[in-house]
Amino acid sequence: EQAIEGDFRCPIVCVLGHVDTGKTKCLDNLRRTNVQDGEAGGITQHIGATNMPLDCIEKRTSFVKKVAFGDKLDIQIPGLLIIDTPGHESFSNLRSRGSSLCDVAILVVDIMHGLENQTRESIKLLKKKRCPFVVALNKIDRIYEWKSSPHQDVRKTIDNQKEGTKNQFKKLYDNVYTQMAVEELNIKLFWELTTEEAGEWIPIVPTSAITGDGMGNLIAQVIDSAQNIVGKKITYNPGVKCTVMEVKAIEGLGKSIDAILVNGCLQNGDQMVLAGQQGPFATHIRQIYTPPANKDLRVKNAWVKHDRVKGATGVKVVGRGDDIEKSLAGMPMYIARKDDEVEYFKGELEEEIGDA
Ligand code: GTP
Ligand code: MG
Ligand code: NA
């Protein structure tokens, strides 16, 4: 198998931000799910992964199509793989794991609170990676006398607010603008951005995950940022790049690994080389599953069985036997398709374990 020009994988979109800014709620709005309601204490404690195919994205952006893409909507990517991360300060390892895989990010900021500690931590991660991102300025519905209108361009919705509401929005936006400038970031409301400014300036999209205001615009901006890196970073490549996110036992399935397959493909029967508590080990894939489209991998689902999956995809892998439960989260999963590769990948993992 060879890399083919014009064969793009799904870009990986990481959602980052301070605790309770509405990251999961935004995804719930886009997916039409209720993951956040089921979280203990309303706090995300694991990395989530959602495969969002193009048809769903097209539906969500239909009413902003003209604004966002002009006359031609020429989306070249097969969809998005969206990674939800926890915002609580104690999970900085998960934020860094999530952001290390992402191609594009959504930084969620609560408009009422402005920049907070983990917002700044996330900005540092994104800067270090030179990762393009979009800011969702969330919870605009909390502005005094906000009138929601989720099925239109959010710019128009803001224009149609009462004078006092508009002024409060402007005041809160200006505050975030200044705070971002302190972080040496230039932000602009997305409708004020010219084509020349894309890449230099960071687009801000006012959103409400509760009412849905701005959610179409948000996903359109994410697609736009992803399209800008098409060809450079997201050409599908057959070399397997896969990271273990979580190891858990699932009733009825047995011991399993949740992983993000960035590139390449996984097949039933493949020999995995994994990092374990007692060092690297090899074991075989018994069965590959994915969550249904628009469902989070970390939630109990009617997982779909596959013989083979291509990246980028969030996957659940069940092994032959229970060896798989020894694997360490955050470490790569290698696939050995030739005999001598097992020892080679074990060597690679020894180094990774040493570095961690
Ligand atoms: P962590 O993952 O724990 O960091 O939080 P989060 O960023 O995923 O936030 P979450 O989705 O858990 O939302 C936190 C709280 O804010 C919940 O009570 C949501 O209902 C509420 N919330 C989220 N988005 C909005 C919004 O746009 N408007 C309003 N009014 N409330 C919101
Ligand atoms: Mg969350
Ligand atoms: Na939360």
Image: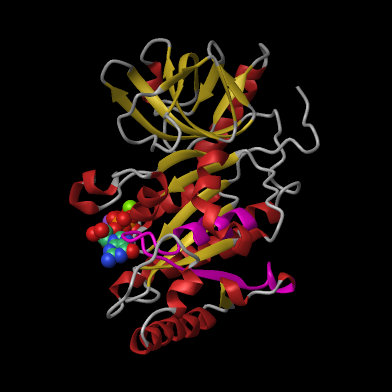
Q: Quadrant of residue 1?
A: top right
> In the displayed structure, would residue 31 be above or below residue 201?
above
Report the front residue among 59 and 93: 59
Report the front residue among 322 and 216: 216
Q: Is residue 239 magenta?
A: no
Q: Position of residue 282 (x, y in %)?
A: 51, 17
Which residue: 59% across, 70% down? Answer: 202
Q: Position of residue 154 (x, y in %)?
A: 47, 69
Which residue: 36% across, 30% down? Answer: 247
**Residue 86, can we see it?**
no
Which residues make up the magenta segment?
196-224
> In the displayed structure, would residue 29 be above or below residue 145?
above
> In the displayed structure, would residue 140 be above or below residue 221?
below
Q: How is the image coloured?
A: secondary structure
Q: Quadrant of residue 207?
A: bottom left
> In the displayed structure, would residue 64 be above or below residue 346?
below
Asked if residue 170 lies left or right of residue 299, the reply is right
Q: Position of residue 74 (x, y in %)?
A: 70, 48
Which residue: 43% across, 85% down? Answer: 170
